[in-house]
Image: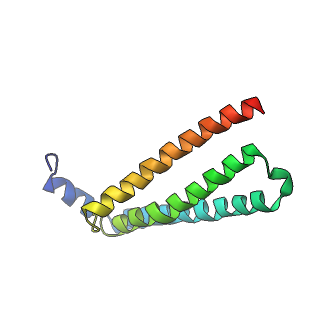
């Protein structure tokens, strides 16, 4: 790679144990809150019959997308930070995880735009 530097690797790998602990704790908290919170909202949207309307279907779709992103992409980031901010999974896995992260962001933007359009005409 053209911009690759060994000096940058040494900086990232020489983090203090406290910094690594804080990063891992915050990432674990984000993963847990994201999965549990979106799962609870999804269960509420499915069980409550009064919420079976178009705007809430969009919200359910966003919740499912966020659960998948949190369950698939974040654990790779968590393990990367745990290993001293080095990616040990290979180039293909890096590209797939990056693709899924970007796809999730564009999916969220599209669903929010669609929700605004649909709800405006309901």
Res 45 quadrant in image = bottom right
Q: Position of residue 77 (x, y in %)?
A: 39, 62
Foreground: 18 or 58? 58
Number of numbered discs visible in the structure rendering: 0
Residue at the spot 70% in from the left edge and 59% down from the top edge:
42
Report whether 81 appears left or right of 112: left
Residue at the spot 61% in from the left edge and 51% down from the top edge:
62
Q: Position of residue 35 (x, y in %)?
A: 59, 63
Residue 14 visible in image: no
Q: Quadrant of the C terminus?
A: top right
Residue at the spot 14% in from the left edge and 56% down from the top edge:
6
In the rendered view, tell whether residue 113 sits above or below residue 85: above
Report whether 46 appears left or right of 114: right
Q: How is the image coloured?
A: rainbow
Foreground: 89 or 92? 92
Q: Position of residue 32 (x, y in %)?
A: 57, 66
Foreground: 116 or 75? 116
Q: Position of residue 55 (x, y in %)?
A: 73, 43
Res 20 quadrant in image = bottom left
Residue at the spot 73% in from the left edge and 35% down from the top edge:
119
Residue lying at the far right of the rendered structure: 50
Foreground: 72 or 85? 72
Residue 78 visible in image: yes
């Amino acid at each position: 790679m053209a911009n690759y530097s060994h000096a940058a690797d040494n900086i990232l790998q020489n983090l203090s144990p406290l910094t690594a602990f804080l990063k891992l704790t915050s990432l674990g908290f984000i993963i847990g809150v994201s999965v549990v919170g979106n799962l609870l909202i999804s269960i509420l949207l499915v069980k409550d019959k009064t919420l079976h309307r178009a705007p809430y279907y969009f919200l359910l779709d966003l919740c499912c997308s966020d659960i998948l992103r949190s369950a698939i992409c974040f654990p790779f980031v968590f393990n990367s930070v745990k290993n001293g901010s080095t990616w040990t999974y290979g180039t293909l896995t890096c590209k797939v995880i990056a693709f899924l992260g970007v796809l999730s962001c564009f999916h969220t933007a599209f669903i929010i735009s669609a929700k605004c359009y649909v709800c405006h005409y309901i």
